[in-house]
Image (cartoon, helix red, strand yellow):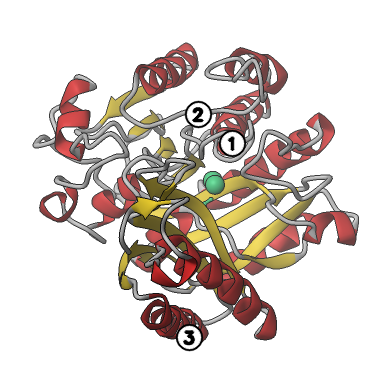
Amino acid sequence: MTFEAMWRDLVPVGRSATSGGYRRSPWTSLEAELRAWFAEAALARGLEVETDAIGNQVAWWRPTTPTELPAVLTGSHLDSVHDGGAFDGPLGVVSALAAVDVLRDRGFEPTRGIGVSVFTEEEGSRFGLACLGSRLVTGATTWEAVRRRQDRDGIYLDDAVSAAGLDPTGDLMSLSDVGCFVELHVEQGRDLVDRDVAVGVASEIWPHGRYRFDFTGEANHAGTTRMEDRRDPMLTYAMTALAANKQARLCDQRATFGRLEVTPNGTNAVPSHVTAWLDARCSDDASLADLVETITRQSHDRASRDGTALTVTAESVSSSVTFDPDLARSLAALGDWPVIATQAGHDAGILSAAGIATAMLFVRNPTGVSHSPDEHAETVDCLVGVEALADTLTMLAS
Ligand code: GLV
Ligand code: MN
Ligand code: MN
């Protein structure tokens, strides 16, 4: 099956008829369908498919002569953000399978194992921790630390994994024989469009984090409560969202409130509670700490004026990642590709932080829009990406 045929096969899975976006949540029937799709595509290529205790998958192309040489892993993820696009994640998985086809057509015989991987809950859209699957596999977090996390419906992670037919106490994917990891991904900005080039190589990932802001006030009647008598947590939240935007602009960094829960969420009541999630990203770890500290301080000041209370909880924090510079340089040399930084998080960042030589290839996105149904990459660029990945694997697995 060609890249285009695989893509056609995968695109309808979980696409909303109204928005055109995806809600491919981990440990749902939709993810089971995606996992089955991957296993079938891998088996059709004669690859050996392994699924671990929490649903991470890897499909192995083993060398004909057994070897002790460390393997090369390539792949991405199949889950999406809420109402996300088709490319963030799936492009890396489909391209990895297509690259295996290209290598076979070229008569390439790997001298070490090549694994095509799919990590689960990369987006952290269900349990709030980005790259949950790869964090567990690398030991960046432990099952004990995460198993009682709850999703928006109050379902615990360990119950969700079991309900998906998996045994979370079983074995996780082992990376002990993996020498390097390459993740191909749709670009999530406009760097490659501006440079007029189809493919780029990642230099670094900005540090980023998710912080839950809990604002507590007093529920009351929207009509009879005098304005000066209110303790309205929505006001504290609203000022905090403006402050976050202003502070990020002032230091040329990124801050977003993209998710909000209001209790009781009634039109004619002052709310008792507002929970809002800040996503903050900066060019270095110290700037990220400063930015979050400044927003938190301004929010506390405002809370004291509003008569509300605030608690801030860091739910998912990822430090800055610099990818292996030699590896990045050799990938770039394969096609004279530019080496560029990204503000988006990836499993590649987690594997890199775990000491595995890691690289990323980006495929041009004509508008730069991502985490949205409008996310796009032209097929012609995707095919250049597949060739670039095949060249990369040739270099790494020869
Ligand atoms: C994941 O794509 C993220 O950058 O949050
Ligand atoms: Mn994403
Ligand atoms: Mn992604």
Image quadrant in which you'd find residue 100:
top right
Left or right relative to 59: residue 247: right
In the depicted view, which residue is nearer to us: 367 or 351? 367
Helix, strand, or loop for circle 1?
loop
Identity of the residue drawn at 49% across and 40% down: 75
As measured in the structure, the alpha-carbon distance from the residue carrying label 3 to the one carrying label 2 is 33 Å
Secondary structure beneath dot 2 equals loop
- Identity, as a three-letter code, of the amino acid under mark 1: Gly
Please name which of the two marks, 3 or 1, marks the residue nearer to the observer: 3
| Percent x, y of residue 355 | 35, 67
Tell me the CA gap for discs 2 and 1. Answer: 7 Å
Choose the circle earlier in sequence order: 2 or 1.
2
Pick whichever of labels 3 and 1 is earlier in the sequence.
1
Q: Residue at x 41, y 42 (%)?
A: 265
* Earlier sequence position, callout 3 versus callout 2: 2
Q: What's the residue at 47%, 74% (across, down)?
A: 320
Nearer the observer, 151 or 102: 151
Q: Is residue 77 above or below residue 211?
A: above
What amino acid is at disc 3?
A: Thr
Disc ID at residue 23? 2
Quickly name the residue at label 3.
294
Some atom of ligand 1 lies within 8 Å of the CB belonging to the residue at label 3: no
Q: CA distance from mark 3 to mark 1?
A: 30 Å
Residue 84: mark: 1
Is residue 34 in sight in this rendering? yes
Disc 3 versus disc 2: nearer the observer: 3
Q: Nearer the viewer, residue 264 or 139?
A: 264
The N terminus - image quarter: top right
Residue 215 occupies quadrant: bottom left
x then y, percent, for residue 180: 44, 55
> Is disc 3 placed on a helix, strand or loop?
helix
Contact (Cβ within 8 Å) of mark 3 with mark 1: no
